[in-house]
Image: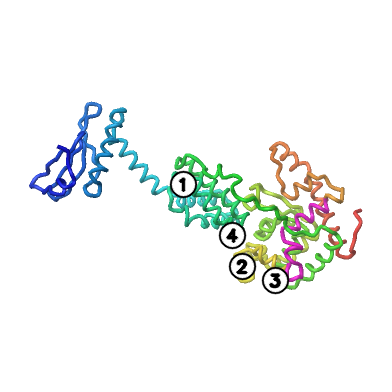
Amino acid sequence: MPLTDRAIRNLQPKAKAYKIADRDGLHLMVTPAGSRLWRMNYRFDGSQKTLSYGSYPSLTLAEAREKNRSAKKLLADGVDPAVKAKLEKLKREFASVNTFGAIADEWLDKIQREGRAETTMQKNRWLIELVRPSLGNRPVSEISPMEVLLTLQKVEARGRLETARRLRSTIGTVFRYAIATARADADPTIVLRGAIATPKPKPRAAITDPKKLGPLLRAIDGFDGHVPTRAALRLLPLLFPRPGELRQAEWEEFDFDACVWSVPADRMKMRRPHRVPLAKQAIEILAELRKATGDLKLAFPQIRALSRPLSDGTLNAALRRLGYGSDEVTPHGFRATAASLLNESGKWNPDAIDRQLAHVDDNEVRRAYVRSQYWDERVEMMQWWADHLDGLKTRPTLPVP
């Protein structure tokens, strides 16, 4: 006779455990301690086995019968329900420790070991922290596209469109790492392409008019603040590197005899080493700077923390102090200044200019050719450029020789 809830509640423990049958092989085991455990005995591949479902009343009579029906169906399909239950438990345990947050931390450790620049690491850590409250504790294999979309929309709603775009990319990178390490099967960000508003490109402010560039160069020469800041400001238009490449430079990178600055790969955007020919004007600025910081590892240290490089904010603030707003010029904008005026001069091969800007060609063979073919031209070009800037300081307009 099938069990009822009233019958189960009236069951009393005995000196020895005993069984009370329900139906379809389901029974209740009553222990001497009073526990009432749902079980099913069955045979699989010639072996007698017992499947445990849970205890009453945590698992109700109706729920136990439903579990039993599912187990019977598995047996009919040739599947051992105990093995399947064990695998599902392992899967749940695996998912509980393989959360998005845990895998994101693994990924951050990995790219740091690969030598990513500290500024890149800081940006990635910041982006991961933005999603940690919503996705951090979720098993990575269970996160749906909708969950990711809701997270991105919160950022988008604050008007931070570029952050939302980068966040989708970073989340996708974490998922692809999870797939590569067998913790996830799919990247939910793929189907979200186009779901977030695209930010309008905002080029960094730069001066490309020679009439306006001369006064800026004179203002920089007149900067009377922190010595490393002044030197960095003077070198930015001369060498036109990415600001982070210059700010974090170490003295061992500069070869005064060969007149070359060798930027290591881990500080370059494309993770390839880069060489910068040093015009005599650049050598003079660096020689003056070395008197102030030559005993240190960093060429451009902070004023109160000599083991840390100048920040991008320091260079921006220095330009603001000289009277130039963020809509007029930025440290990064000197790259656009050089690219525009060097190309307009018509004196230099565009490939040589691109190579000096560390713009990397996707074609491996062509990249090797460009690297070897234009070094001598780049040396000549950088000295011409330094002389040209000196001329702009003294004359509002300067014809190209």
Q: Earlier along the polypeptide chain: callout 4 or callout 2? A: 4
Residue under pointer 3:
226
Judge from the rendering whether residue 43 lies leftward or rightward of residue 286; answer left or right. left
For label 3, count other residues whose C-alpha is less than 10 Å away and answer few (under 14), some (14-19) or many (20+). few
Observer-side mark, 4 or 3, equals: 4
Residue under pointer 2:
306
For label 2, count other residues whose C-alpha is less than 10 Å away and answer few (under 14), some (14-19) or many (20+). some
Q: Earlier along the polypeptide chain: callout 1 or callout 3? A: 1
Q: CA distance from mark 4 to mark 2?
A: 37 Å
Q: CA distance from mark 1 to mark 3?
A: 50 Å
Q: Element type at marker 1?
A: loop
Q: Which amino acid, mark 2? A: Leu
Residue under pointer 4:
158
Question: Which of the two residues, 124 or 147, is positioned nearer the viewer here?
Answer: 147
The stretch in magenta equals 319-342
Q: Which amino acid, mark 3? A: His
Q: CA distance from mark 3 to mark 2?
A: 13 Å
Q: Earlier along the polypeptide chain: callout 4 or callout 3? A: 4
Observer-side mark, 4 or 1, equals: 4
Q: Earlier along the polypeptide chain: callout 1 or callout 2? A: 1
Q: CA distance from mark 4 to mark 1?
A: 23 Å
Indicate whether residue 329 is drawn in magenta. yes
Q: CA distance from mark 4 to mark 3?
A: 37 Å
Observer-side mark, 1 or 2, equals: 1
Say whether marks 4 and 3 touch (CB < 8 Å): no
Where does the N terminus fall, quadrant-wise?
A: top left
